[in-house]
Image: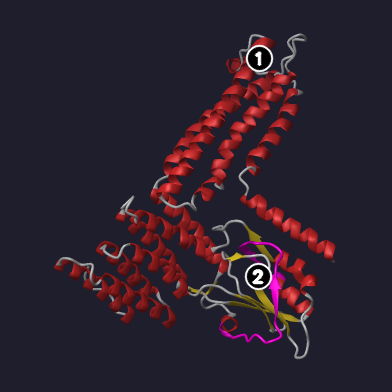
Amino acid sequence: MITRLRVKTHLARLKLAFANAVWVVPVTLAITALCAAQVLIEVGFTMPSQLSFFLSTGGAVGARDFVQTVATTSLTVATLVFSIAMVVLQLASSQYSPRLPGQFLRSRGTQIIIGIFIFTFVYSLTVVRAIRADESFVPSFAVTVAFVLILCCIVALIVFIHHVVQSIRVESILGYIERKTRKAIGAAYQRRGDDCGEERESRIEMPEEAEPIVLDQSGIVRRIDGKDLVRFARKRGVVLCLVRMIGEHVAAGTPIGWIWADGEGQKPPPADDTREEFTVAIQLTADRSLEDDVAFGFVQLTDVALRALSPAINDPTTACNAISSLEILLVKLTGFRLGNRQFHDEEGILRVLVPQPTFADLLDRVITPIRQAAPDDITIAVCLCDMLSDIARAAQTDEQRSAVATQLERIEEAFKGAAQQSVDVERLIHAANRVNSALEGYTPRSP
């Protein structure tokens, strides 16, 4: 059983490592190029005379020189592409957020484009080795394919330049984070109106005999598999209460949760016997990811807004764009059940409690840093009020409306002394009135 758990643990870690690795696609294409070259060298197919313009080598020496040129050119362009990528990463990190470069490198488009150049380079080297001038052996079809590949490299370079120009635009960056976060929201939370609503609202009491769940490694909680934890808890006859959310850092030797037996007078299994099973269900990594971490999307968008509001950049327009993206995500969240998630077994017995942020928590994480970063900017205050107004109209629970009202009070208190002119005071008052009207359910009749 322990061996199976260890194998499953290693497979889970490898899967997570491959999902984050930048080298997987280029290395895969390099191996594919090596195999493809070996196969095509043996192909005796020759080009029809009508297509002879694709290949005019002048014999074995000319073919070798041509393929060597293809190999040198593809490697040179690959180096150029990588250098451009590094410059883009540095610019995005300094201009928008230090957490954005990882997302750019994980882009499949970037990896495939770099992989095309690596594919061409490895393929050309393999073909060059097969061209024997002393025996006048020329793999014509393989050389023709090398010519086609260098044309593909040219197209890939043009596409990459277009990709870089588009990806560095703030609208593209915000849109990318927004799309990834929307997808993560749908995977992490349950829509309102679905069943299991009572499961989330029930409370769990931790007994005094509860034992800590301690892992032997440090890292950021990347994934929590509730189904695996439920199967483990049911088999062992225990209840689990985690205290760390996805995206939070855990130090080795500190509790990530608590475990206790579901029957009175019983003791939970020893920690050493269960650590392997927890390692499978709770995965730790060195960084956060938009695929599983909803809060990380809000962190990145907030970072963009804060960087735009810094004295070094001073770009309120970009900050307002980031606030608009945050608004879209927060409005979407009003239709989902947030807060701690509870998992029951097939018999309806509560087995696992996984902490998750509430709507008020996420709203506060967004507004508080922006409000503190621009206490004198009325434009930002109005943008925040407009965001709260739309959220208030989409709110479906009293908890959500209460969170909006609380944030409105803090905004009014923070910006009440910032207005230097009467027109700014009126703008702030009108913006706050729109939020109050939305909370009361009034529909605006005029802009």
Name which residue lies at 56% across and 26% down: 76
Q: Is residue 41 above or below residue 416?
A: above
Task: List the single residue furthest toward the front.
Answer: 253
Disc 2 designates what residue? 254
Name which residue lies at 24% across and 72% down: 416
Can residue 417 be seen here? The reply is yes
- Amino acid type, label 2: Thr
- Near mark 1 (Cα within 10 A), the count class, few <14, some 14-19 or many ≥20, is many
- Mark with earlier residue (2, 1): 1
- Amino acid type, label 1: Ala
Can residue 397 be seen here? The reply is no
Disc 1 designates what residue? 63
Find the magenta span and give its range. Answer: 201-228
Coordinates of residue 363 in the picture (x, y in percent): 42, 71
Residue 213 colored in magenta in the image: yes
Q: Quadrant of the C terminus?
A: bottom left
Coordinates of residue 106 in the picture (x, y in percent): 56, 48
Q: CA distance from mark 2 to mark 1?
A: 64 Å
